[in-house]
Image (cartoon, rainbow, N blue to C red):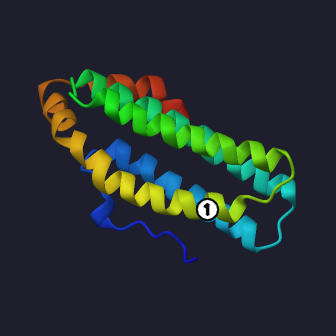
Amino acid sequence: MAKLVWSTDLNTGIGVIDKQHQRIVEYINELDDARTSNHKREDVGRIIDETVDYTLSHFAFEESLQEEAHYPFLKAHKKVHELFVNKVAGLQHRYSLGEDVSEELHKMLFTWLYNHIKRDDADYVEYVNKNIQQGSFVEKKKGFFGRLFGG
């Protein structure tokens, strides 16, 4: 499978979200490198854990923006995140039991991220951007989440 390459068509127009998505792309590519370069199992496991941890933090940040913006489909968006988290948790568990799920996980992340950005995330951008124009809640959130995302 080819590397996932960030392109401008994946930009949501919300800078902090785009940076987080770009970092997730980097994690996905790190997983592919580790998986295909015969890295130690522990290295692959660490990258899987870091990818999942970062993605969960990203989801929390994204959902907080949606909540602030009174996004009417927040519950549905959270449900999409929950389903994803459950699927990844299952793969993590299988990996912890010794099964090599790194290729399956990489393919799922690769496909899911692109589709999620283009469909699900695109739907809330208008609401969040309106809220940004009406106040600086993103700046407040950056203070709280800044340490997680380097911002």
Q: Which quarter of the picture shows residue 106?
A: bottom right
**What residue sits 29% from the left and 23% below the top?**
67
The residue closer to the viewer here, 139 or 37, is 37
Image quadrant in which the C terminus is located: top left
| x then y, percent, for residue 74 | 30, 29
Residue 61 position, x and y percent, is 42, 31
In the displayed structure, does residue 38 sit left or right of residue 75? Answer: right
* Residue found 46% across the figure and 56% down from its top: 112
Q: Taking the image as drawn, is residue 150 in sight?
A: no
Q: Position of residue 114 (x, y in %)?
A: 40, 60
Give the labeled residue for mark 1. Answer: 106
Q: Residue at x 57, y 64 (%)?
A: 107
Say which quarter of the image contains residue 86.
top right
Give the residue type that dot 1 points to.
His
In the displayed structure, 99 sits above or below 15; it is below
| 126 to the left or right of 113 | left
Image coordinates of residue 64 in percent, x first then y, are 36, 25
**Above-or-below relation of 116 to 16:** below
